[in-house]
């Protein structure tokens, strides 16, 4: 179960709110406590963190390519992209623009 699903599952286990409805702060306390436990158990990255794949060009410019839920998915996409770049004989169409393959310095993964 991924972190977001764990948080969602913990929030669902909260008992139903009575017709008198408790104040919002008291209703959200179990959800906030569950989120804090998840953050402590999984390091400092928030549950919503994603892995961004970007291309870095010769001049230092970065082109965003995609955002992925897991590092493994990002690595797979980045690897496939490096294969495409290494065999390209023509300019590549990436993120709405054409890029010369020899202008690409690296394919980077960044967690956000």
Image (cartoon, rainbow, N blue to C red):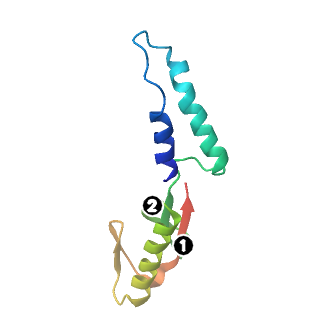
Q: Which residue is mark 2?
A: 68
Dot 2 alpha-carbon crowd within 10 angstroms: few under 14, some 14 to 19, many 20 or more: some
Residue drawn at x 52%, y 49% as measured from the top left: 3
Q: Which residue is mark 1?
A: 59
40 to the left or right of 49: right
The answer to whether 5 is drawn above or below residue 20 in the figure is below
Residue drawn at x 48%, y 34% as measured from the top left: 11
The answer to whether 31 is drawn above or below residue 23 in the figure is below
Q: Quadrant of residue 94?
A: bottom left
- Residue 26 is situated, as x and y percent measured from the top left of the image, at 55, 19
Find numbered disc 2 in the image and state the secondary structure of the residue it sits on. Answer: strand
**105 vs 10, nearest the viewer:** 10
Mark 2 to mark 1 CA distance (whole Å): 26 Å
The answer to whether 60 is drawn above or below residue 100 in the figure is above
Residue drawn at x 67%, y 45% as measured from the top left: 40
- Residue 81 is situated, as x and y percent measured from the top left of the image, at 42, 78
């Amino acid at each position: 179960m991924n972190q977001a699903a764990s948080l969602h599952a913990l929030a669902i286990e909260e008992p139903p709110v009575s017709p008198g409805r408790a104040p919002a702060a008291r209703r959200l306390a179990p959800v906030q406590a569950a989120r804090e436990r998840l953050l402590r158990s999984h390091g400092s990255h928030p549950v919503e963190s994603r892995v961004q794949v970007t291309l870095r060009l010769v001049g230092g410019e970065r082109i965003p390519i995609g955002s992925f839920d897991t590092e493994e998915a990002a690595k797979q996409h980045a690897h496939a992209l490096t294969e495409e770049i290494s065999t390209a004989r023509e300019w590549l169409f990436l993120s709405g623009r054409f890029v010369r393959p020899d202008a690409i310095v690296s394919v980077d993964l960044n967690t956000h």
